[in-house]
Amino acid sequence: MVSLQSEVFKKLSKLEQNSLPAHQNAQFYRHRWWQNEAGWKNILNNLRLIVQPKIFLCLLTPWLLVFPIPNLMQGLLELVDIMNEFKPYLPSG
């Protein structure tokens, strides 16, 4: 999963990547902990940032059943939906 996000694999399919909007993931890159450097460790850290809201939702849900905070639950669900809009590089065929 991490290796597929490296520049080496992205360059193998220029046509596929050029068909995607340039601004598609731009907002994700604005996170203060996003790492723009190349390398598997940076890619791994960025993918961790993308999955964090889902993990936190799963960890907090049992507590939100004990102490209901509807706005918090709704906000976390909305954040998870936004994270699901991240479009990683996926090779075709």
Image (tube, rainbow, N blue to C red):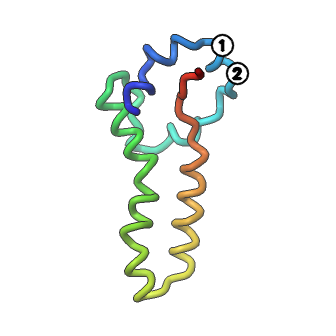
Q: State the residue at coordinates (38%, 81%).
A: 63
Query: Residue 5's quadrant in the figure?
Result: top left
Q: State the residue at coordinates (44%, 81%).
A: 64
- Placement of the C terminus among the 4 image quadrants: top right
- Placement of the N terminus among the 4 image quadrants: top left
Element on which disc 2 rests: loop
Relative to 81, does residue 27 appear above or below in the rendering? above
- Which residue occupies the extreme left position in the image? 41
Nearer the observer, 67 or 33: 67
Element on which disc 1 rests: helix
Across and down, in percent, residue 88 comes to 53, 34
Looking at the rendered structure, the kind of residue marked 1 is Leu
Mark number, residue 15: 1
Q: State the residue at coordinates (59%, 62%).
A: 78
Relative to 49, does residue 64 appear above or below in the rendering? below
Q: State the residue at coordinates (65%, 32%).
A: 23
- Residue of label 2: 19
Across and down, in percent, residue 4 comes to 44, 25
Left/right of residue 38 with respect to residue 71 in the rendered view: left
Looking at the rendered structure, the kind of residue marked 2 is Ser
Labels 2 and 1 touching (C-beta < 8 A): yes
Query: Residue 27's quadrant in the figure?
Result: top right
Across and down, in percent, residue 3 comes to 38, 25
Q: CA distance from mark 2 to mark 1?
A: 6 Å
Nearer the observer, 27 or 87: 87
